[in-house]
Image (cartoon, grey):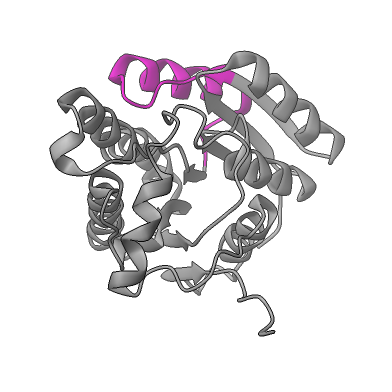
Amino acid sequence: MTTSRIAVVTGAASGIGQAIAVGLGRLGWSVALGGRRIDALATTAKLVDIEGGHAFAHHLDVTQPGSVDAFFDAAASELGPCDTLVNNAGLAIPGLLVDTDADALQREIDTNLLGPLLCSRRALGPMLDAGRGDIVFISSDTARMPRPGMIGYSATKAALETVARVIDMETEGRGIRTTVVRVGPTLLTDFADGWKPGSFEHLLDLWPRFGIQRHFNTMQPADIANVVIHALTAPAHARVDTIEIQPVAPPVT
């Protein structure tokens, strides 16, 4: 199913979101780009257009219902009702729970869980009216294997996968497909920009004790984009439920 479609990608300013948006542009799709950094969104929009798509960039703070409504209204006015939503926006704030302040936990919950709920809520109406649509949730392997020192991120990603399951049940028989893309270690452009120096490195010493981090190879954002596109372009009669993508281990020496 590669005919032109109208997609929304949240967190599209850089990293995985940008790679997904560019990949959809390569299919010739129209892509509404949401994020808080308008200048960076403009860069993504140029890349989408270069690849043959049609980009529309608009400010989006997924934690604010008013911002979500304004974004979806503007995108629908410019491109038409979306039939594809990629819930990509997310953040992680490392630290042990005892050392984490309440505001940090609130930001993780609002961005990683409330945001996808608000965006999916807005996207579902047009999809149900049309009798077709896709919603992709960018999750993390921390949902399956939670990490000490990333309690908020692990918990919200696990909850996000529950959201995907419930939406699938609520829309069964209505032509809506939900897909969870569970991402392993990925080289990101600015995911850790807000981390305080020394807030993360010491946590790596905890993970081997629980068999979590076997090696430190990483993937590229384009690897994740390819998986998302695989799910979105599957035949209409098939649904990709959950994909987990991990980097290959380095050669044994």
Which of the two residues, 56 or 247, is positioned nearer the viewer here? 247
Residue at image coords 64%, 35%: 31
The answer to which of 107 and 213 lies nearer the viewer is 213
Figure quadrant of the C terminus: bottom right
Q: Which residue is drawn at 42% across and 15% down?
A: 70
- Residue drawn at (24%, 36%) of the image: 109
- Say left or right for 215 vs 163: right
* Farthest residue, direction bottom: 252
Residue 3 at x, y percent in the picture: 71, 54
Q: Where is residue 54 in the image (x, y as percent from the top left)?
A: 74, 32
| Residue found at x 62% / y 27% | 79
Q: Quadrant of the N terminus?
A: bottom right
Q: In which quarter of the image is residue 117?
A: top left
User: Residue 167's x, y, as percent?
Assistant: 27, 54
Q: In this view, does 104 lie above or below 241?
A: above
Image height check: is 20 above or below 228?
above
Which segment is the magenta one? Answer: 58-82
Q: Can residue 153 be seen in this view?
A: yes
